[in-house]
Image (cartoon, coloured by chain):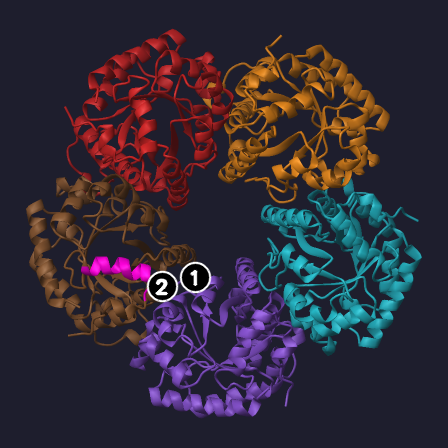
Chain colours: A brown, B red, C orange, D cyan, E purple
Amino acid sequence: MAHRLHLDDLNLSPGKKTRLHRLLYRSGPANGTLMILPIDQGLEHGPRDFFDAPESQDPNFQFRIALEGRFSAIACQIGLAEKYYPSYAGQVPLILKLNGKTEIPADESPLSPVIASVEDAVRLGADAVGYTLYVGSVRQDEDFQQFRRIREDADRYGMPVVVWSYPRGSAIEARGGKDTIYAVDYAARVAQELGADVIKLNVPKLEPEKLIRAPKAYQRQWTQESALQEVIRSAGRALVIFAGGERSAGGTALEKAEACMKAGAAGLIFGRNVWQRSLSEALSMAQSIREMLDRYAV
Amino acid sequence: MAHRLHLDDLNLSPGKKTRLHRLLYRSGPANGTLMILPIDQGLEHGPRDFFDAPESQDPNFQFRIALEGRFSAIACQIGLAEKYYPSYAGQVPLILKLNGKTEIPADESPLSPVIASVEDAVRLGADAVGYTLYVGSVRQDEDFQQFRRIREDADRYGMPVVVWSYPRGSAIEARGGKDTIYAVDYAARVAQELGADVIKLNVPKLEPEKLIRAPKAYQRQWTQESALQEVIRSAGRALVIFAGGERSAGGTALEKAEACMKAGAAGLIFGRNVWQRSLSEALSMAQSIREMLDRYAV
Amino acid sequence: MAHRLHLDDLNLSPGKKTRLHRLLYRSGPANGTLMILPIDQGLEHGPRDFFDAPESQDPNFQFRIALEGRFSAIACQIGLAEKYYPSYAGQVPLILKLNGKTEIPADESPLSPVIASVEDAVRLGADAVGYTLYVGSVRQDEDFQQFRRIREDADRYGMPVVVWSYPRGSAIEARGGKDTIYAVDYAARVAQELGADVIKLNVPKLEPEKLIRAPKAYQRQWTQESALQEVIRSAGRALVIFAGGERSAGGTALEKAEACMKAGAAGLIFGRNVWQRSLSEALSMAQSIREMLDRYAV
Amino acid sequence: MAHRLHLDDLNLSPGKKTRLHRLLYRSGPANGTLMILPIDQGLEHGPRDFFDAPESQDPNFQFRIALEGRFSAIACQIGLAEKYYPSYAGQVPLILKLNGKTEIPADESPLSPVIASVEDAVRLGADAVGYTLYVGSVRQDEDFQQFRRIREDADRYGMPVVVWSYPRGSAIEARGGKDTIYAVDYAARVAQELGADVIKLNVPKLEPEKLIRAPKAYQRQWTQESALQEVIRSAGRALVIFAGGERSAGGTALEKAEACMKAGAAGLIFGRNVWQRSLSEALSMAQSIREMLDRYAV
Amino acid sequence: MAHRLHLDDLNLSPGKKTRLHRLLYRSGPANGTLMILPIDQGLEHGPRDFFDAPESQDPNFQFRIALEGRFSAIACQIGLAEKYYPSYAGQVPLILKLNGKTEIPADESPLSPVIASVEDAVRLGADAVGYTLYVGSVRQDEDFQQFRRIREDADRYGMPVVVWSYPRGSAIEARGGKDTIYAVDYAARVAQELGADVIKLNVPKLEPEKLIRAPKAYQRQWTQESALQEVIRSAGRALVIFAGGERSAGGTALEKAEACMKAGAAGLIFGRNVWQRSLSEALSMAQSIREMLDRYAV
């Protein structure tokens, strides 16, 4: 099995270490792995994500799943954090997402504007902040500068930074799109270079017909395993968590997730694949994930 | 009847709760519902809105209606607040609108610039601030960042934030326009995600020929009732108030308004439909609204 | 005769009232009306405005006219204020213009950049600040935000704000141009909404062939009198002063000015029509204006 | 001979007067005139300006000329000021240029970005700061705002401001170009209006075929003398210095320079025309200038 | 042999001198020359640069080379500095790169956004900061302003500034491209003018067919030696270090490097040409460089 980073490998400041320790060893699997429940889709995709599972439209539903499903943390925007988190404060760790956008305007040059601050996270008792970085966007200069201010504040307050590192924009499309190993690999490295502590990546897809438009160095045979290991290496001393993606059959999702863990991932972030179910199904899914993660303690 | 939010459900800070309590229980219907009189049309549409009711050109007219018609609050821009509100201070609560624009330049990528601050609102003794958010505009990144600074100041001073959440811009037009259930629903959620305490929405229109351009999830049968309930749910723990819209026959307007209350709205915001009338007609209209709202006490 | 606002009607802070009182009752006609001498054309139009009256190229000429012609105040930019006003300090009140631009670049989306601060005005002993607002410009969002900072500083220091409210830009042209009653009327209201204490307007022109492109509500018969009264009403509790415009025969200019006063204006701002003359002619013109204003004491 | 401004005419603050007094009466000709050596061409034009006089590539060469040629001051950017000025501190006054750019990108909408601050100038012991203003550029709004911050800091620290006032950009080209009396005249006035203490102008060229595109008021017979007097008058109470321009025969350059002084200029700024020579030739040129300036003491 | 600058020639502040002295005399060759190991390619080019030397994907590999190969310093971005440098603190000096970008979006108007601060460098114990300047880019005004803030902070904290001075953008392409003597020469001067203490340049290429598009002054016969001497002179009192470039045969690279030193360079910056090798080869390459540099002690 691949090498897996330990918290002690990260050279973190005391504040970051304290908070990340809580996420890794005091909640969720509590074995050094991460299991995050995100509920930022209401902003990113709109209410349509909730239509097939009506209960999920009420944010309290996700907070309840996070608590009863024993997730390491719930990740959401400031609006939900202010209105729903107070009832769960101290019981479920919070990752405050600091930027976000809707899917409405065209996405050729995406930038996710900052709508909350590290200070908001401190004030609310959050254990980490989240930031969505659009690697390769024409507006990456604004993105980098915007991220810099978050990173600096996070350093000042000892707050771990989770980067949703997404290759995006027309230049990425021209090189094969956001799901190639090339795109995800570069995104992982960029997040590392800019100072992420935890990096959320999407699982690269093996589509040779797309990869052919990527730089020459990537023109080789990739397996799911080698691709996962590659992007995890590109994240360096940042913990990598992989997305569960859209709702799919529980078994398939778990297999994919375990492949990530085997390749060295630090954990998983499962949103729609968990909360687009009834409460009991969601909790059962959570339990399956937790049991799987128990085999990857660090 | 639909569930209606109570002030205690909102997890507000003491400052926000104090001020919102004044709006809900110490003025207007004083029964937990809201009845707001806005006079921001002079900036948004220009003086033309006053031509059919000449008295209405004098802002003092609206302040007088707010007082004598026992509205929960009057909402206006800084210029009117500074020149007219002093004579009504303590008698009519003030919601200070913080941004606004004219209708003159083209509206494909709208952004409503901030022209007053939360500090102005505190200084003037206002009980809430208002912000117009153009959900889906190409400039939504600027809008979100601008709103963030308002939201942070409002958190700092304990000032409730009322968001006029308007789907707008060319991308919204391409998906069926600003009045579809899709557009209003997304706008409601966005305002919730960004941290609104009260959300002003327009009543969605049931126009199947437009809705067809919206995302697939919305391709279903909607009734006025189900549409209203949907957008209220999308607002989460923010109070929803609906617009009375342009002047229309009093009976029709009240019926529409009552449908909103039945669906779970927290209140109404009636501008032109009230003050584009003579004083006596306006006060009579106000009384009808109040009597109706008395049936929806929380 | 139309109602005329009194200083006490404006609900001003003590600082603003003190300074505006000086302009209204301690200098110029000293009867509650205003008679302003602007010398900002050197920046706005360039030296060409001085060619027909060579003495006028020396800013000292205008300061001398302001003093000897007993104007309520002189209005100029920071450069002239710093170099010429010191010799007149205490003798002629100063209105410091805070923004300005040249006429050289194309004017489709005008914005007048800020080149001095309210603090400069305080430091120099000015009694008001001036700001040029281009209502309807594509860049009105920047303009509003820029004005907001001036308005806030003016509130902080108790400094009256005079807004030169000019409809401008391609969208205004498309609706009939900057001189229609529609355009001037909207500009008056916008200045009021944004917090002006005094509003400088141009006299609307009655050109039906242009007005036809304005919104429907304006499609009615206007007289000079009804048009002036309309725009003055749209200014609400801000004092309105009208421009004397380009140099014209003294009699004509005075007649036009008196029509403004009759309609309820608070005063006049005469620049080129005064200082594009010899000193003796300019002083004689000033005396005529003053005598006329004496008939409109408030 | 034309009237020449005296330091006492300028209404300067004590700090500005102290520093400008040093430039006018304690260094260079020390008779109330200015003789400035600029070395900002390495940034503006690149090293190519040094190719015909290889010694000039070493900035120390210009500092030596400034000292041994007894110039009133040397003007340069922060990089040279930090590395070369220390060896000359106290011996040659420094004018720190605060903005600059390369000639590489297209110049249709020029803006010269700020690369040093008034505080840098104070820290280095400079006696004035320099700023290049591109009058008429489409980006003049940014330029004015940028200059405003410099002007305010200069007021705060009592630091004289020298404005290189250059008409530039496509709108200027459309009106006959940067060298017409129209363009230079407007540039002079703008610098005055914005608050310059000293204005550097280029000598207007008498090219009727270009002037024909300028505003009507300028369509008259100009002589070199009347043109120079006009632009000097447009500078008001700011001292005007004229550029020596590119290297030319010493005699011609001096004649042109003396015409400027006769017209009322306060001094000269000679760069390439001095340092694109051998040291001995440069010093001899400097001596000729000084001797000429001695005839224009103020 | 060409003249070589000594630390004492640079007129540095005590803080800058202290830190640069450590780089020149307490680490690396410790003879007044510089030998820098950069690892910023992971951000600039993406992980593809590591594919031919898999060990190099782990930043620890470069830190180890820097230490065991006795480099003067390692240069990297904030992410690597925070996670890897702590283990080497005190043993290998750090140059913190403050800006960077990916190669993904089009490069016609490049700007490298700032992602870390001089304060970060101070906090981490770095001995210099690095900044990439794109000379000639259409966005050079933003670049200059961005650099200014770095330069000012560096002056405040006594932190030496290393400028990666790169001619770039469409206007540079139109003049023959980024590698002509013209382009590199101008870049060297610009970095000097803006306040660099150390300037990293690429070795100019002698391609007459490209140079023909450069300004006339550059149309002469250049040798590698005269070209190198020219650009070093254009750097003035800033130390010049040359890039080793892409991996090439060790001998060739060393010859090229020695030519730079002979021409007066202060040192070398070797990245891929060192770390795209096995550890032993890399260390052997480092030793060869060091031995060569020993012949150029200052």
- Are labels 1 and 2 on one chain? no
Label 1 chain ID? E
Q: Which residue appears at 23% of the width and 24% of the height?
A: B260
Q: Would you say A182 lies left or right of C49 here?
A: left
The local crowd at label 2, few if under 14, some if 14 to 19, many if 20 or more residues have their Cα within 10 Å, is many
Q: Would you say B186 lies left or right of C109 here?
A: left
Tell me the quarter of the picture where residue B242 sits: top left
Identify residue type, mark 1.
Ile
Dot 1 corresponds to which residue?
Answer: E115
Query: x and y percent of residue D38 in the render?
Result: 74, 64
Identify residue type, mark 2.
Gly
Question: Do the residues bearing badges 1 and 2 touch, measured as CB atoms within 8 Å?
Answer: yes
Label 2 chain ID? A
Residue stretch rendered in magenta on the structure: A12-25
**Gap between marks 1 and 2 measured at Cα:** 9 Å
How many numbered marks, from 0 up?
2
User: Along the line of sight, which residue is nearer the eye, E62 or E172?
Assistant: E62
Tell me the quarter of the picture where residue A261 sits: bottom left
Q: Would you say C15 lies left or right of A226 here?
A: right
| Quadrant of the rendering where the C terminus of chain B is positioned | top left
Would you say residue A19 sits in the magenta stretch?
Answer: yes
Above or below, comparing residue B22 to residue E88 in the picture: above
Residue B177 seen in the current view: yes
Query: x and y percent of residue B45 in the render?
Result: 44, 26
Query: x and y percent of residue E195 in the render?
Result: 60, 67
The local crowd at label 1, few if under 14, some if 14 to 19, many if 20 or more residues have their Cα within 10 Å, is many
Would you say residue C237 sits in the magenta stretch?
Answer: no
Q: Secondary structure at mark 2?
A: loop
Dot 2 corresponds to which residue?
Answer: A195
SS assignment for the magenta stretch, majority:
helix
Q: Secondary structure at mark 1?
A: loop
Residue E99 seen in the current view: no
